[in-house]
Image (spheres, grey):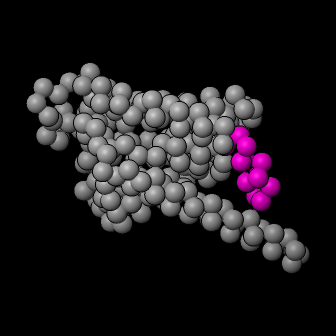
Amino acid sequence: MTTTTTRTANHSKTLHLIHIAMFAALMAIGANISSFLIIGGVPITLQTFFAILAGLLLGSRMGAFSMVVYAFIGLAGVPVFAGFSGGMDTLISPTFGFILSFVLIALVSGWIANKFPTRIGFVMAALAGLVVNYVFGTNWMYAAYKLWFAAPEGFTYQMAWAWMAVPLPKDLILSVLAGLFGFRLRPIIQKFK
């Protein structure tokens, strides 16, 4: 292996680590940018937007890995989750399913964007990521409230989904924007891979 090849390989690995760290940091910022706005049991954040962008810009594998890094940082006790929370007790939180869904969002949106590398493909990838977020996170939240967390009085499956109706318009708009931004920015990111 030549010196140039070694330097290029090291440069590429360094950029991958920087991209992963950057999206973990963006998730922490997005989690707490509106940390005091909570509707029902659901904090209103920008995490879905950044999880989608991670998948679109870094690809499914690296995007998902950046979300795993974010989750582990929070579980280690650093207050990077919504409401400046963190720690192992988050595992039993009703909203922990949304944190897990971020890994799936990046996987799904990155995979679809790779299969359909058009503007429409990226927007569809972003919307698919949003669906994954809502389905996985809301079902986890419902199960948590029913099985191990104290549910609010009269809590039903419909109530869980009603809580999700509040951030839905914001998330739909941000998902479409993430798809459009991702389509425009991906060639720039790919140039440095």
Q: Residue 83: image x %, image y %?
A: 31, 54
Q: Nearer the viewer, residue 45 or 20?
A: 45
Q: Residue furthest bottom?
A: 3
**Residue 126 to residue 12: above or below:** above
Residue 105: in magenta span: no
Question: Does the magenta run of residues contain 188?
Answer: yes
> In the image, is 89 to the left or to the right of 22?
left
| Identity of the residue furthest to the left in this view | 153
Percent position of residue 38, x then y = 29, 43
The residue stretch that appears in magenta: 182-193
Q: Quadrant of the C terminus?
A: bottom right
Looking at the figure, which quarter contains the N terminus?
Answer: bottom right
Determine the residue positioned at 86% across, 78% down: 3
Q: Is residue 192 visible?
A: yes
The quarter holding residue 85 reads bottom left
Quick check: 184 left or right of 97?
right
Q: Position of residue 49 (x, y in %)?
A: 52, 43
Residue 79, image x and y in percent? 34, 63
